[in-house]
Amino acid sequence: MSFLSILKNEAKGIFTNSTIVLAMIGGVLFYAFLYPLPYLNQSPEEQKITVVDLDKSELSQKFILMANASQQLNVVEQAESIEQAKQQFLNNTVSGFLVIPYDFSDKLQLGQAPTVAYAGDASYFLVYGTIIEGLMKVGGTLSAEYRVAHMAIDGTPITTAINTFQPFKSNYTPVFNRNMGYVEYVVPAVFVLILQQTLLMAVGVRQKAATASENSSLQLIARFSLFLISELILASFYFGFVFDHYHISRFSNVLDLLIIMVPFIASIILLGMLLARWFPTPESILLVVLFSSMPIVFSAGFIWPTELIPNALTDIMHLLPSGFAIDGFLKLNQMGAGLHSVLLNISGLYGLCLLYGLGLFISKQK
């Protein structure tokens, strides 16, 4: 049988298998538009809060108005007591509540720092952090006004008072994440992982479904080639159309991306074939790949700081293609690093190809 005939038979075995098509193609298309949805607004804004104003002064009202005018906060309710505010929070009317103490205006006018209290659900970290950020900005602005005013009353020139309170001004320009949002921060790295996990499932299922006659050397080469070409097309769709759709920055050229993409995909295919040797059924492969996704995400170093991840766990993650690929793709595509900066990543991916290939050879001899 000619290699062309083998290629045709293998293409039929891959693309007529609904599980493979759903995992490799359907999964990529599905996650391309599902995963970024929670991040499309880039960061939480206008979080609803209620206020318990125990001071009931002009200054406390000014504080409430400033909070409501901020980008992060939206004061939708005012409660007469902490218990009432707590009930509004438990009823999901608001995301938290602010308590302004009785001595708020007195301390502020005396040049002291009054303490306001905030309560909310910290398990929603982005929402909680947004509200805290908004309150800190409003409190800092109001406090600055009175500190500068006290210095002016004491005889300090107003310009000097402002410069003393704010000795320097920051002027920062985002370089890699232009919008300072979550889409450009999270999505590029997760897309690399999605490509890995969906392809692993597809290759593993195909390998388990193949008969003994379909596992000849030429058949494996045909299978490897078809998966490589198909995944290159899907990866190009991710890093091309989908990035443009979500306005994600791209700093690399096509050739550099291909140089790292080829060993990345090749290593995934070989790993998928090796997993099929280790696990007895296609279902077991699917379960292992699915349940490993979250640990891989948190061990990749872009969501959880690398410094807080045990070295042993980081070393284990480098036994997977994503361990080298996520770091390499982010440096090339999101940070504009040259190809020389990711030579270690590329070498690691080719090293994994050799490791998986050797594992396949050994397992085939048994």
Image (cartoon, helix red, strand yellow):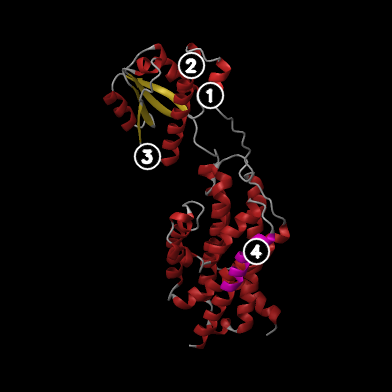
Is residue 357 something that shows in the picture? yes
Query: Residue 82's spot in the image, x, y percent?
Result: 29, 24
Q: Of the residues shown, which amino acid type is indicated by label 4?
A: Ile
Name the residue beneath numbered marker 4: 260
Q: Name the residue under label 3.
A: 122
Q: Sequence-wise, which precedes: disc 2 or disc 3?
A: 3
Which range is magenta? Answer: 339-352
Secondary structure of the residue carrying numbered label 2:
helix
Secondary structure, mark 4, is helix
Is residue 60 positioned above or below 359 on the image?
above
Q: Earlier in the sequence, mark 1 or mark 3?
A: 3
* SS state under label 3: loop
Question: Given the image, on which type of amino acid does mark 3 rest?
Answer: Ala
Horizontal side, residue 187 vs residue 115: left or right: right
Q: Which of marks 1 and 4 is nearer the N terminus?
A: 1
Rendered location of residue 92, percent (x, y) = 36, 32
Of label 4 and label 2, which has the lower sequence position? 2
Local packing at callout 3 (Cα closer than 10 Å; few below 14, some 14-19, many 20+) is few
Asked which quadrant contains residue 347, the reply is: bottom right
Which residue type carries mark 2?
Met
Q: In which quadrant of the rendered image does the N terminus lie? A: bottom right
Residue at the disc numbered 2: 151
Give the farthest residue toward the bottom.
Answer: 365
